[in-house]
Image (cartoon, rainbow, N blue to C red):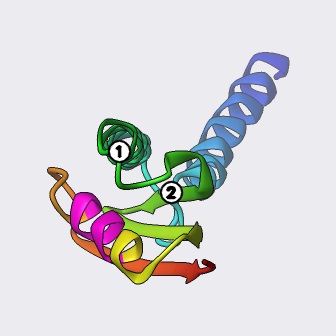
Amino acid sequence: MNLIRNTLAATITAVAALVVLPGCAVTRDQSTVGEYIDDSAITTAVKAKFVEDKSVDASAISVETLRGEVMLSGFAKSGTEKARAETLARSVNGVKQVKNQLEVRG
């Protein structure tokens, strides 16, 4: 009788785990590991372009990426710098869209 009870308990536990654990999977609002890695690579590439281009102050611009959408925030010295930062960000492979939230402060 104990063997049947233990087997039944183990089976119920296994079924419960199969029902509950998928709830811990990535949901629609979260990034997958692959998306996170891709987004990190995009962010790094955008920042690298800023460092290489002397017309953009890389230290004054923050770059965040989510699902290929890049958001630029921080400060630009001119409208030209703001536009150049956006152009550089758009030139990176994998970028789907750029939200340019840079404020011009001269």
Q: Identify residue for label 2.
A: 63
Towards the viewer: 102 or 14: 102
Labels 1 and 2 touching (C-beta < 8 A): no
Of the 4 image quadrants, the one containing the N terminus is: top right
Q: Is residue 86 magenta?
A: yes
Which stretch did the figure color magenta? 83-89
Q: Name the residue rendered at 50%, 52% in the picture.
A: 57
Q: Name the residue rendered at 39%, 66% in the picture.
A: 70
Q: Identify residue for label 1.
A: 54
Element under disc 1: loop
Spatial CA span between label 1 and label 2: 17 Å
Q: Residue furthest right?
A: 2
In the figure, is residue 49 to the left or right of 24? left
The location of residue 73, given as percent across then percent down, is 57, 70
In the figure, is residue 63 to the left or right of 3? left
Q: Name the residue rendered at 56%, 82% in the picture.
A: 104
Q: Residue furthest front?
A: 106
Dot 1 amino acid type? Lys
- The disc at residue 7 is none
Q: Nearer the viewer, mark 1 or mark 2?
A: 1
Dot 2 amino acid type? Val
Q: Is residue 88 magenta?
A: yes
The location of residue 9, given as percent across then percent down, is 77, 34
Element under disc 2: strand
